[in-house]
Image: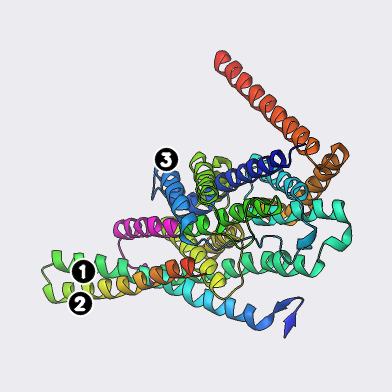
Amino acid sequence: MTVFAVDGHLLWQVVWVSLLAGVGISALFSFVIVGAARADEARRAGNGGAAVGWAALAVVTFALFAVGVILGVQALVHK
Amino acid sequence: MDHDLVLWIVVATALAFDFTNGFHDTANAVATSISTRALSPRLAVSLAAVLNFAGAFMSLAVAATIATGIVHADLITPAIVFAGLIGAIAWNLATWYFGLPSSSSHALIGGVVGSAFVAEGAGAVYGSGIVDKVVVPALVAPLLAFAVGGLAILVAYRIVGSQRPGPVVRGFRLGQVLSASLLALSHGTNDAQKTMGIIFLALVANGNVAPDADVPTWVVVSAATAIALGTYVGGWRIIRTMGSRIIKMDPAQGFAAQSVGATVILAASHVGFPLSTTHVISGAIMGTGAAKRVSAVRWGVAGNIVTAWVLTLPASAVVGGVTYALVALLGTDGVGPVVVSAALLAALAVALGRRLVAGRTLTAEG
């Protein structure tokens, strides 16, 4: 379907890609903050196991966040 | 008159537009970071300036497409480009004066449409191109960013909700440095290209370079420098509007608005549907505010911004058209651009002089 001169399929693609990427990147970084904060709290409380678990969450979500940023820079370079 | 003189006037005007583009759009990258104190104002604009400069070198595909599909490319002359640039610069300065964020790309398109219309008549302008490249993106960008920004902040609040405020504030402030950097880099890559494209077109039209030649290094360096200098000078009135007059934001909202802004711009660009950075960031800021509380958004300010967006194309088109009419009256071969440039520079000097005198009077009275 074409709305005016714009391809409706393209528009829909913009909407869902933006939604997924925008909400996803904010959620990932929020998990980084939660993981880091909880890991710090658990370490102070002497709960080593929980500290490692929360730190792992922070590291994994940060790695995924970093992948998102790298994909963004790639999109910039190869547009 | 020497054709090279007209060429250099167009080059200088394009760089002046690039400078206003930089200072007008500084707010997109730094306003939320400054507002939430993630970065100090001077550090924020310095970082944005450096990344805008670097961004200009990242992708060197000539973006000579700013008005392609909107005006008949074969009819474009240096005088039309000159008048279009004047229209865009005038709109950028007017909206900066009132502290209103608006799209520099749409201003440039409007300026060129107006001057082409006066020069060649209605046949020179493609109506479908305006709908396709200006109207639809201008509707989609703020609405999409508003919705995604609102959803993103609700998800972020839900995730960090039970945490102590200290680490959350520090974490989001750190995240804002990253998202601001990505936005500044993206701005340099997109917007410096417009000026490079215009200068390249003028050089080709004047016979200085072949159409299939690489963009000369001095063009890349001068466009990158102009946008970086403009960014460093900073359009503080617009930074104030975007940072604190639309909503009073916390670091989580600042991060969500910036990261949603960056991802929406990049995602849309990736699938081939470029959107205005200004429209996206403004929409995301409003969305993150409204999701917290609808009354948190100062809708009066938001209304003024939307009014500026609606007026961008017609207002810059009128200035571009009037400028072209003046240039044509005096002679498009050189006298027109020279006289109009000299008159505008004189008016600018008078305005700056008055401002300096008023500043001195206020200081003396104080």
Say whether residue B158 is visible: no
Q: How far apart, in angstroms, are the residues tagged by discs 3 and 2?
A: 39 Å
Residue B254 vs residue B126, the one in the foreground: B126
Q: Are marks 2 and 1 in contact (CB under 8 Å)?
A: yes
- The amino acid pointed to by label 1 is Ala
Task: Identify the residue position indicated by label 2 in the image.
Answer: A53
**Is the N terminus of chain B in the top left, top right, bottom left or bottom right quadrant?**
top right
- The amino acid pointed to by label 3 is Arg
- The amino acid pointed to by label 2 is Gly
Whether residue B176 appears in magenta in the rendering, the answer is yes
Residue B269 vs residue B292, the one in the foreground: B269
B83 left or right of B211? right
Q: Check the image and report above or below for B42 versus B224.
A: above
Mark 2, secondary structure of its residue: helix
Magenta: main secondary structure equals helix
State which chain disc 2 sits on: A
Task: Identify the residue position indicated by label 1 in the image.
Answer: A39
Query: Which residues are drawn in magenta?
Result: B158-182
B13 left or right of B166? right
Residue B42 got which mark? 3
Residue B280 vs residue A39, the one in the foreground: B280
Mark 1, secondary structure of its residue: helix
**Is the C terminus of chain B in the top left, top right, bottom left or bottom right quadrant?**
top right
